[in-house]
């Protein structure tokens, strides 16, 4: 086998390495394997299909250019309708294609922590989604990580490549069955946005109350490329910790991160974004909206300006509605003359004045409050296709009922 | 009809309105004058029902209902609408949605057509009041009231921050809202049209410019929380211009203020 042995060796050394942030999880307490089974999403019980729909998965596949589903530890479905787009199970790609080695463990380090190490040592599968040069997706490609085995550790490794001049939209939903309670999901994602390519990646999480989630993501954006990274999590979870890192490498490359989090009681969300601006004309924006109803939310953001003529902005707004902790940690780091970087952070409550204003227009207090909350979570995401915006709105609308 | 009887109001521990009486009959529009800080806005906010304005005594009746202690939204449902001087920004809520909220259950409201009428179509997809100029806020408030269509309109300084060009638009829109635009070729005579007016208005103004577009039945001056008697609004305006608020109140209230000194 190609280079895989070197990764294995590195991983073995990092098997007990704690992550920089987040609760340390004993991975030995989880199962690492489950029976492979095919999954016909249309044949799933209604309650599961609804969970998938809330995570942006279109079970009819009508408005999707391709679908990838992994159930527990194996691929359950992989199909593509759109010309110019490839969707391949990762293990298959590792066996068949040489080019995959240019991407596998290239932006995320295999020995970063025990979770990356475990994802190499007990790799279950994952997907490779590649938009060929010049191709444009009409409908987004959807990927679903589904878990229904109690006490399972799911390890996936995903590689997303937008070749030169291509436009690729991916929506990924992570869902646990309504019967499942405890488990851990480790997801490695490596993104490559080539010259003048545009990639949007929208991730919606819909986990169970005793789930730990440790995504590890990295991205490289070349000259003139655009990387849009959206994250929505409105449901309870035991803990999520992630700090995706993007490297803007070519002139004019742009990255925008948007995250929308509603924190339930007992849940801990440690979610950040880090963007290195390495080339002239780079632009970066990190926008986070978080509401806590008794959960703990740590919203991190880190912008690093290493080239003149870059612009970067970080915006972090939090609302505390029913107790909980909201911790905004914005960081700006300029390394050279000529950078323009700013941030604004605010943690607070719903302004009474806004409630009264809406009441003066006829809404009762409860409706006024939920209208304001919905507005708070309604972030304008430039460049996002209306369809994906609609998926995000749907996820917000669904959980808005629970928030109030 | 709006009937205010011997109203006394406190804000943050301080009495800001004393013994206010007021009566606005269907079809009438009143104008409220007074220097800054005299309590004009407080009176409007009290009528609208903002809870920080605490009613210590007296009562407010609207359409025969005692609304003195009703919440804001129930007053809105009864038909009271207000154009605010400094309304808050609501992030993420589009002006389009706000206008729909104002329309409530009435499905026949054409938001876009209303917006065009106040030259506000381009703002429909912007967050409510986010970065709006003074004049834009006024037009946005009017647009909301057009959709809300209340029976009693409370206007807090509709002219402030408005340029000359927009003043005419705002003046004419307010006249229309109050049912004052006259249709000359209507089957009904002008007198008949006037008699059939039911909309009520209470307008705070400093400059009186609004009187060029809106015919106001009566005017009152509020000075240090005390209301003067009812007069012709043009008369009051002339008096304020010539001798100032204090003298004007003294002269209008006449004997009352003499007794105080």
Image: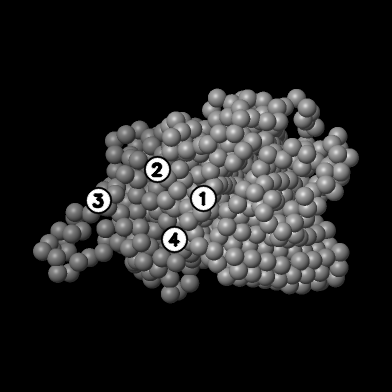
**Mark 1 vs mark 2: in front:** 1
Pointer 4 and pointer 1 on the same chain: no
Left/right of residue B186 with respect to residue B237 in the rendered view: left
Q: Give the CA distance from mark 4 to mark 2.
A: 20 Å
Quadrant containing the N terminus of chain B is top left
Q: Furthest residue to the left?
A: B187
Pointer 1 and pointer 2 on the same chain: yes
Asked if marks 3 and 2 touch (Cβ < 8 Å), the reply is no
Q: Nearer the viewer, residue A334 or A68?
A: A68
Which residue is labeled 4 in the image? B124
- Residue B195 percent coordinates (x, y): 19, 55
Which residue is labeled 2 in the image? A362
Asked if marks 4 and 2 touch (Cβ < 8 Å), the reply is no
**Mark 3 vs mark 1: in front:** 1
Q: Residue under mark 1: which chain is it in?
A: A
Identify the disc placed on residue B198.
3
Q: Residue under mark 2: which chain is it in?
A: A
Q: Earlier in the sequence, mark 3 or mark 4?
A: 4
- Element class at badge 1: strand
């Amino acid at each position: 086998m190609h280079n895989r042995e070197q990764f294995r060796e590195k991983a073995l050394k990092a098997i007990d390495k704690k992550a920089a942030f987040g609760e340390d999880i004993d991975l030995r307490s989880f199962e690492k394997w489950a029976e492979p089974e095919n999954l016909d999403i249309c044949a799933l019980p209604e309650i599961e299909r609804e969970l998938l729909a809330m995570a942006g998965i279109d079970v009819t596949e009508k408005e999707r250019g391709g679908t990838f589903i992994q159930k527990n530890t194996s691929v359950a479905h992989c199909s593509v309708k759109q010309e110019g787009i490839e969707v391949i199970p990762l293990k298959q790609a590792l066996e068949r294609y040489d080019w995959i080695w240019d991407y596998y463990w290239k932006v995320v380090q295999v020995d970063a922590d025990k979770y990356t190490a475990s994802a190499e040592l007990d790799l279950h599968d994952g997907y490779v989604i590649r938009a060929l040069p010049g191709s444009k997706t009409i409908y987004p490609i959807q990927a679903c990580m589904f878990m229904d085995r109690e006490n399972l550790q799911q390890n996936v490794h995903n590689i997303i490549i937008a070749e030169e001049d291509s436009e690729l939209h991916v929506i990924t939903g992570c869902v646990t069955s309504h019967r499942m309670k405890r488990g851990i999901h480790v997801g490695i994602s490596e993104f490559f946005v080539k010259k003048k390519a545009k990639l949007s990646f929208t991730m919606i999480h819909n986990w169970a109350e005793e789930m730990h989630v440790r995504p590890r993501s990295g991205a490289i954006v070349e000259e003139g490329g655009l990387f849009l990274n959206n994250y929505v999590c409105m449901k309870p979870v035991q803990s999520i910790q992630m700090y995706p890192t993007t490297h803007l490498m070519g002139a004019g490359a742009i990255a925008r991160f948007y995250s929308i989090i509603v924190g339930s009681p007992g849940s801990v969300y440690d979610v950040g974004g880090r963007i290195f601006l390495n080339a002239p004309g780079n632009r970066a924006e990190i926008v986070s909206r978080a509401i806590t109803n008794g959960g703990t939310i740590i919203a991190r953001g880190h912008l690093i300006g290493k080239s003149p003529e870059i612009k970067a902005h970080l915006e972090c707004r939090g609302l505390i509605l029913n107790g909980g902790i909201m911790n905004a940690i914005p960081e700006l780091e300029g390394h050279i003359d000529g950078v323009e970087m700013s941030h604004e952070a605010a943690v607070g409550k719903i302004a009474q004045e806004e409630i009264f204003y809406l009441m003066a227009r006829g809404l009762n207090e409860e409706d006024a409050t939920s209208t304001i909350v919905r507005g708070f979570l309604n972030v304008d995401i430039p460049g996002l296709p209306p369809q994906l915006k609609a998926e995000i709105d749907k996820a917000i609308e669904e959980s808005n009922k629970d928030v109030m | 009809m709006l009937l205010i009887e011997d109203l006394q109001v406190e804000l943050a521990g301080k009495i800001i309105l004393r013994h206010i009486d007021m009566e606005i009959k269907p079809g009438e529009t009143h104008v409220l004058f007074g220097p800054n800080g005299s309590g004009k806005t407080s009176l409007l906010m009290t009528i609208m029902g903002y809870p920080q304005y605490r009613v210590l005594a007296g009562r407010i009746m609207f359409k025969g209902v005692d609304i003195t202690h009703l919440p804001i939204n129930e007053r809105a449902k009864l038909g009271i609408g207000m154009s605010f001087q400094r309304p808050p920004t609501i992030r993420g809520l589009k002006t389009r949605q706000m206008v729909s909220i104002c329309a409530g259950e009435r499905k026949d409201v054409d938001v876009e057509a209303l917006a065009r009428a106040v030259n506000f179509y381009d703002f429909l997809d912007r967050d409510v009041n986010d970065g709006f100029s003074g004049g834009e806020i006024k037009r946005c408030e009017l647009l909301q009231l057009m959709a809300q269509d209340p029976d009693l309109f409370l206007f807090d300084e509709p002219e402030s921050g408005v340029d000359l060009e927009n003043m005419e638009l705002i003046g004419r829109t307010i006249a229309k809202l109050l049912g004052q635009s006259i249709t000359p070729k209507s089957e009904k005579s002008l007198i008949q049209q006037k008699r059939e007016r039911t909309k009520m208005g209470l307008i705070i103004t400093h400059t009186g410019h609004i009187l060029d577009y809106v015919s106001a039945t009566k005017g009152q001056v509020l000075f240090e929380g005390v209301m003067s008697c009812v007069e012709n609004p043009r008369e009051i305006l002339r008096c304020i211009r010539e001798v100032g608020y204090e003298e004007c109140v003294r002269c209008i209230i006449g004997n009352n203020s003499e007794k105080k000194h």
